[in-house]
Image: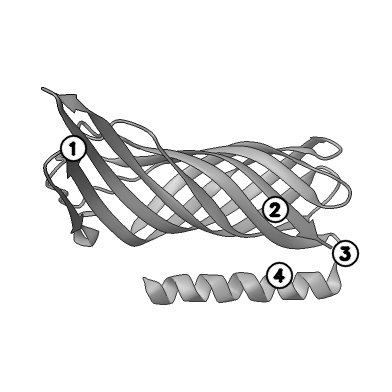
């Protein structure tokens, strides 16, 4: 799977360089987003987790209305739960770290304002289960308990200024079950995230 990810990244970089050299409608840049995530289907870690996403973004303008926006992002996802039982504090958290590859189609409603829709493939690079109690705590690596590949659908909206500043919102919902034997949860688990992001595109 690491080889596949490397090939995809190299291919994306090659296409971007060729497009940049030959077509002024190609733009590339960076983005950073505030990310709120959860695991759909969980019974023990139902609360939202706040974190971030950061990476590279590009846009190839097909015509006045349509564009394609591939991205390469690092995202910290997961879910958490905290509370108090009989006077004893507890916090449980699943940390999932992904390299995500969204490939979005964009439709410009009017100048600068666009709707985004498309698939996203995520590659899991690290995961941990953390449990804290008033009297003790532990961290367990659980990489083998989750599927390496996650396929999601993404929907969002963005606004881009003439000088390249980008701001947008996006919701992604996992289409595949990522539970591969996680002992804390026996049912199906799917990623879900909401992000508010900012970026800058160079021409």
Quadrant of residue 70 within the rendered picture = bottom right
For the residues marked 1 and 4, what is the alpha-carbon distance in whole angstroms? 41 Å
For disc 3, the marked residue is 24
Q: Between residues 63 and 96, which one lies in front from this camera angle? A: 96
Q: Residue 141 at x, y = what percent?
A: 21, 60
Residue that appears at 55% across and 71% down:
9
Mark 1 lies on a secondary structure that is: loop
Q: Crowdedness of circle 1 by 10 Å Cα count: few (<14), some, many (20+)? A: some
Q: Position of residue 167 (x, y in %)?
A: 71, 42
- Would you place residue 46 above or below residue 195 in this image? above
Q: Is residue 30 in view from this perspective?
A: yes
- The residue to which callout 4 is attached is 16
Q: Which residue is mark 2?
A: 68
Residue 187: assigned label: 1
State the image coordinates of residue 44 (x, y, percent, origin top left): 20, 33
Q: Residue furthest top?
A: 86
Tell me if label 1 and label 4 are in contact, CB under 8 Å.
no
Q: Residue at x 75, y 55 (%)?
A: 200
Badges 4 and 2: C-beta atoms under 8 Å apart? no
Q: Secondary structure at mark 4?
A: helix
Percent from the top left, x then y, of residue 95? 32, 50
Query: Disc 2 or 1, which lies upstream in sequence?
Result: 2
Mark 4 surroundings within 10 Å by alpha-carbon count, few (fewer than 14), some (14 through 19), many (20 or more): some
Query: Which label's residue is closer to the chain start, 2 or 3?
Result: 3
Kindly indicate whether the residue at mark 1 contacts the one at mark 2 (C-beta within 8 angstroms).
no
User: Which mark is in front, 2 or 1?
Assistant: 1
What is the spatial separation of the Cα atoms under label 2 and label 3, in whole angstroms? 14 Å
Q: Could you say which is closer to the camera, residue 193 or residue 149?
A: 193
Work out whether mark 3 precedes mark 1 in sequence or the reverse, and give the earlier one. 3
């Amino acid at each position: 799977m690491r080889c596949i990810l490397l090939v995809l990244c190299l291919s994306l970089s090659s296409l971007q360089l060729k497009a940049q050299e030959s077509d002024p409608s190609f733009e590339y840049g960076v983005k950073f987003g505030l990310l709120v995530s959860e695991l759909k289907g969980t019974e023990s870690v139902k609360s939202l987790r706040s974190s971030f996403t950061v990476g590279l973004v590009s846009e190839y303008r097909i015509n006045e209305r349509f564009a394609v926006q591939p991205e390469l992002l690092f995202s910290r996802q997961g879910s958490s739960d905290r509370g108090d039982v009989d006077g004893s504090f507890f916090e449980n958290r699943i940390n999932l770290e992904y390299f995500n590859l969204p490939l979005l189609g964009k439709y410009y409603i009017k100048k600068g304002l666009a709707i985004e829709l498309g698939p996203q493939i995520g590659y899991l690079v690290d995961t941990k289960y953390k449990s804290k109690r008033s009297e003790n705590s532990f961290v367990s690596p659980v990489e083998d308990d989750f599927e390496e590949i996650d396929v999601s659908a993404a929907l969002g909206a963005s606004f881009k200024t003439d000088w390249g500043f980008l701001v947008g919102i996006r919701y992604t919902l996992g289409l595949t079950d990522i539970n591969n034997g996680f002992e804390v949860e026996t049912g199906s688990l799917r990623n879900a995230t909401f992000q508010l992001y900012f970026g800058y595109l160079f021409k």
